[in-house]
Image (tube, rainbow, N blue to C red):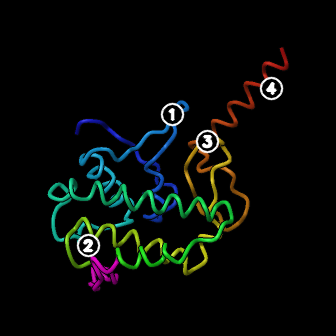
Amino acid sequence: MTNEVTFPLISGNISIDLINTEVVRHGTRHDLLTQPEHVIAWFHTLTKKSIIINQQFNKEIKHWAEDALPLLREVRSLLRESYEKMADEKVLSSDWITHLELLIKQAPFTYQLINDKLILIPIGEPAKALVSLIALDALTLFDSDQLSYIHRCANPDCVLLFIDTRGRRKWCSMKICGNREKVTRYQQQKKKEK
């Protein structure tokens, strides 16, 4: 692999985890999906967390990662714009739903029993199948009203989004921004004490 990439999986929802493949490091926005190798790494990260499983696709990722890259970046852009609107308590257009429905139609679903669990299996080209699973996740979050709980990280430099149904969470992750804030406050307190 050309560049080792670590993906912040903080939601367990593939559509939010896709959006969170754009991060800010040292004040600069970075796209973690710029090469087919990154798509492969992201795919493997998702399978390790059981967000998706290999049996949902009819070919190994290495054979279709290049085809998936532009599709993932396009749907990520659509979802980021929409999810940020929801985080800012704005209304989504009905075009958003229609667009996601069309993405699902490109790789509709069947079901298969795998390890005693009923699994959605997208039918069609694997790259479109992955996008179909992402679109379904987004529509499911919308339908279940989970998107009304989507938030931006309290760190103004962070672009990660997350769902918080309890209303207590401020940070995308304590490991990412929460600890940074604690360290910053601690250092500021120490300076004041001197």
Query: Which one is in front in this view, the residue at disc 4 or the one at disc 3?
Result: 3
Q: Main secondary structure of the magenta part?
A: strand
Q: Where is mark 4, residue-wise?
A: 189
Label 2 sits on a secondary structure element that is: helix
Which residue is drawn at the image coordinates 51% and 34% (left, top)? Answer: 28
Q: Tell me how many marks there are.
A: 4
In the displayed structure, 14 sits above or below 25; it is: below
Amino acid type shown at disc 2: Gln
Q: Residues within 10 Å of mark 1 (few under 14, many from 20)?
A: few
Sequence-wise first label, 1 or 2: 1
| Location of residue 51 (image quadrant) | bottom left
Label 1 sits on a secondary structure element that is: strand
> Which label number is shown at residue 177?
3
In the displayed structure, 177 sits above or below 57; it is: above
Query: Which one is in front in this view, the residue at disc 4 or the one at disc 2?
Result: 2
Sequence-wise first label, 3 or 1: 1
* Alpha carbon distance from label 4 to label 1: 27 Å
Residue 33, horizontal then vertical, whole percent: 35, 47
Q: Residues within 10 Å of mark 4 (few under 14, many from 20)?
A: few
Residue range (magenta)? 104-121
Which residue is drawn at the image coordinates 65% and 43% (left, top)? Answer: 178
Q: Residues within 10 Å of mark 3 (few under 14, many from 20)?
A: some
Q: Where is mark 2, residue-wise?
A: 56
